Amino acid sequence: MTSTHHTIDYVELGAHDLAASQRFYEQAFGWRFTAYGPSHAGIQSSDGEGEVGGIDATASPRAGGPLVLLYSDDLDASAASIIEAGGTIVREAYSFPGGRRLHFADPGGNELGVWSST
């Protein structure tokens, strides 16, 4: 599965109980998961080629829905573009098992994330 620069790449669901959420999605839709420790599971693509999303037990379910993540070839340049375009970085870049990511708010208040494998 190939990620494309500045396109929607991943959707992350918050969950109070990771195991219960996994059971629900497995039973309801046949989803399969990649375990990343006690608080996170990746949602495998239905074709088995990569992941399309995740469940994060450290994040509460969002009233506005799941967190949408864009992919970036250059996370630092994307952060600069977000700020230059009038957005706000709401969570500075941090490392996670798949690379690095940050969260931003657009001028309308929508929170999204951007991640990079490097």
Image (cartoon, rainbow, N blue to C red):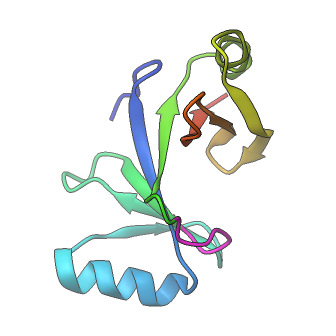
82 and 93: which is toward the camera:
82
Give the quadrant of the N terminus.
Answer: top left
Tell me if residue 57 is in the magenta stretch: yes
Quadrant location of residue 8?
A: top left
Q: What secondary structure characterizes most of the magenta part?
A: loop
**Could you tell whether 111 is left or right of 10 in the image?**
right
36 and 5: which is toward the camera:
5
Q: Residue at x 66, y 24 (%)?
A: 87
Q: Residue at x 63, y 36 (%)?
A: 105
**Could you tell whether 72 is left or right of 30 in the image?**
right
Please say if 106 is above or below 55: above
Please say if 32 is above or below 91: below
Q: Residue at x 59, y 66 (%)?
A: 36
**Image coordinates for residue 15, horizontal then vertical, percent:** 53, 76
Q: Residue at x 27, y 80 (%)?
A: 26
**Image coordinates for residue 45, horizontal then vertical, percent:** 28, 53
Please say if 13 is above or below 1: below
Quadrant location of residue 16?
A: bottom right
**Could you tell whether 48 is left or right of 55 in the image?**
left
**Image coordinates for residue 59, horizontal then vertical, percent:** 64, 68
| The residue stretch that appears in magenta | 56-62
114 and 48: which is toward the camera:
114
Give the quadrant of the C terminus.
Answer: top right
Tag count in the figure? 0
Please say if 108 is above or below 26: above
Tell me if residue 38 is in the magenta stretch: no
**Image coordinates for residue 81, horizontal then vertical, percent:** 66, 11
